[in-house]
């Protein structure tokens, strides 16, 4: 689907909601990959969308780096952020003028806008109705992003294949002893993924040897310390291809293992199988998450994080697969998300098993081949 | 200075402002390294500070990962986030009860709180006065963080020394031809910094060969493509040591260079010398930034970013060295910040020269030795 087609999917919504202008922001503190999804521009920028009654959306991009935008952005117009003194309020003023937005119009700004800054928008644009809300156009875009289109699914086939290849290579090199430290494993991935055309990694690689695997996210992310020695080691990584990230976690379990460690592994694998068996179109995400939490509770264990999450242009995006009462996500065909049960023990270490699942009309397709690897 | 001593520096302020409870948040979308600065805990968490009239602050940490907090956090109490159903509003409710905060008290939440979420706090805590504002305790903490204490300056001496060593090694390996691609340079740094005890890098390494150096921040950050071939290549990186990041940029200029490229280099070096000569205690940051912008404007060039920024637990923190009318930062002894003039041309490529400056009572001390390296 072209960027323009994606933008036009928002037009009907804008017309119904009578939103004349919508502002998206992708900056250091408030990142919104919807800008890349809507324009192709992969870097800091503001994006203004103006709907007209013909059903078309006009897009004005205000990039931090004009040169980069000229290479990547497919939009109707580009004006450098420096033309607006690098101030978002000035840029909004410019966009209102550029699109001749009538006084009194509804103008939507991102729902992540900090309250004190929101007050400045309201004050600066008293002649307009400033909207800053949940359930607005930004959430609408996130909802559309949660169901992948055919091009996106094709990208996921590619990045999953690269991810699977590299997992196989890593396993081989760990078995042979060539990769024996956390940083060796991580840097192997950083290098190999770029040689295969990836943009890089989707998030900081987490590699934790047996002494550090008790952390959900080890700190630091990886060190020069040993990896995959006796006990439980966790490797959590994602590769980024054309903007889209995979997200997998391998656990390496090297003998001798204690009974407690064997139990963590068995429970995690059981939880993973249970979750996968429950994935289908129309099921509430929290039902699956609650089942896994219940399985662990029955074993007197507790998973300190959610069961999974959507992936895409962000490493964590919709849908959330978490057992919270306010989690209303329902799984739908076209969604791509992780399942990642894990258990962590300060003494015995941790284990997690995470794969990427594409939900198709005929059921879940497991895109990646992460597993608990016994050494 | 101990974490407790840092927290107590905020007590007087809390008493004067009659803030009984302050909440800090370090989560995926809203990161606040003040939590690490105040507790040592390096990962996701909420932090609640309660002031009492004796001048002491009580600190309750609500970490996402309890095991990690037990290793790192120096606080009065720790309660796992999962005890609050992983909901910030529940955690605040718990903290109010834990500290027996009287009804009607002033409770400060982060100023980056999104407006729709702010409304939920106000609704949920009608019996308290919820503050969400600029100029509050979070900014106070940022202001304190901008002036480094002796331990922090000592950490900067260490991380600067490692940064300088690695720049020298990189230059040698580039001259010898051992490092010839962007990813080779980046992965050398990723590996070498950890072997020297760094936590990792402070931000994604940016390495752009001559074809990509026109971008302020190249996209992708680094590739398998060639580096330091004829023309201008930029390497921008920071090493993170005990939480604190350095931030330097080298430009590699390999002959033959066009007159236009020579001019970019000469102007950038001149701007750097001008800026450095103006650094002194009491000078307004924007005065220096304006002088550099003026120098470039005189040469019919324009720098598309700010002149520099504070560094510390974040790669970008206070003070800002930017030429904006609302930039009120005044340089003070104890501050550590970058100077990083740069120019970027879609045809000729870009160059940037960035070093870390410690402002001492006797003037600027250049901690790092980045330069434009002619090959």
Image (cartoon, coloured by chain):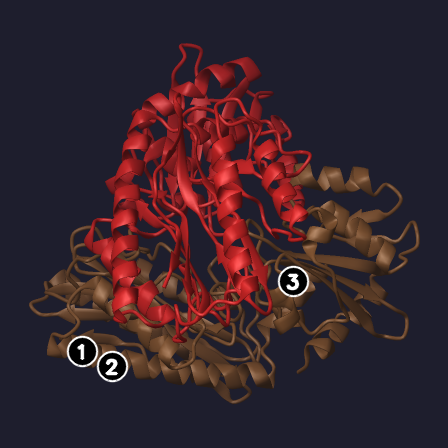
Chain colours: A brown, B red
- Real-space CA distance between mark 3 and mark 2, rounded to the nearest whole angstrom: 40 Å
The crowd level at tag 3 (other Cα within 10 Å; few <14, some 14-19, many 20+) is many
Q: Evaluate whether label 2 is on the same chain as label 1.
A: yes
* Residue identifier under label 2: A169
* Residue identifier under label 1: A173
Q: Nearer the viewer, residue B140 or B35?
A: B140
At x 54%, y 57%, the residue is B264
Relative horizontal placement of residue A301, taking residue A48 as reference (left or right): left
- Real-space CA distance between mark 2 and mark 1, rounded to the nearest whole angstrom: 6 Å
- Real-space CA distance between mark 3 and mark 1, rounded to the nearest whole angstrom: 43 Å
Q: CB under 8 Å between callouts 2 and 1? A: yes
Q: Earlier in the sequence, mark 3 or mark 1?
A: 3
Percent of width and height locating residue B336: 42, 34
Label 1: state its secondary structure. Answer: helix
Relative horizontal placement of residue A138, taking residue A309 as reference (left or right): right
At x 52%, y 86%, the residue is A154
């Amino acid at each position: 689907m072209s960027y323009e087609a994606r933008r036009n999917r928002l037009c009907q919504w804008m017309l119904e909601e009578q939103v004349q202008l919508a502002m998206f922001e992708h900056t250091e503190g408030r990142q919104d990959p919807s800008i890349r999804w809507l324009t192709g521009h992969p870097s800091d920028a503001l994006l203004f969308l103006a709907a007209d009654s013909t059903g078309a959306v006009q897009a004005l991009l205000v990039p931090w780096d004009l040169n980069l935008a000229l290479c990547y952005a497919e939009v109707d117009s580009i004006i450098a952020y420096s033309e607006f003194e690098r101030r978002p309020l000035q840029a909004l003023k410019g966009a209102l003028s550029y699109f001749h937005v009538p006084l009194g119009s509804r103008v939507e700004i991102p729902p992540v806008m900090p309250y004190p800054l929101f007050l400045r928008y309201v004050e600066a644009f008293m002649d307009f109705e400033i909207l800053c809300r949940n359930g607005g156009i930004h959430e609408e875009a996130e909802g559309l992003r949660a169901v992948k289109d055919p091009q996106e699914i094709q990208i996921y086939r590619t990045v999953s294949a690269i991810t699977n290849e590299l997992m196989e290579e890593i396993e081989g090199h760990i078995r042979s002893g060539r990769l024996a430290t956390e940083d060796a494993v991580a840097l192997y991935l950083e290098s190999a993924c770029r040689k295969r055309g990836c943009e890089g990694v989707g998030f900081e690689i987490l590699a934790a040897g047996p002494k550090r695997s008790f952390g959900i996210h080890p700190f630091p992310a990886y060190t020069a310390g040993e990896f995959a020695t006796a006990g439980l080691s966790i490797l959590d990584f994602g590769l980024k291809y054309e903007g889209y990230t995979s997200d997998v976690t391998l656990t390496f379990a090297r003998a001798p293992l204690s009974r407690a460690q064997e139990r963590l592994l068995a429970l995690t694998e059981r939880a993973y199988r249970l979750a996968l068996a429950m994935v289908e179109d129309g099921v509430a995400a929290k039902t699956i998450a609650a089942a896994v939490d219940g399985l662990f509770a029955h074993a007197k264990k507790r998973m300190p994080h959610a069961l999974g999450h959507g992936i895409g242009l962000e490493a964590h995006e919709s849908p959330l697969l978490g057992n919270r009462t306010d989690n209303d996500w329902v799984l739908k065909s076209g969604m791509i998300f992780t399942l990642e049960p894990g258990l962590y023990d300060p003494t015995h270490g941790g284990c997690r098993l995470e794969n990427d699942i594409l939900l198709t009309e005929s059921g879940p397709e497991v895109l990646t081949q992460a597993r608990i690897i016994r050494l």
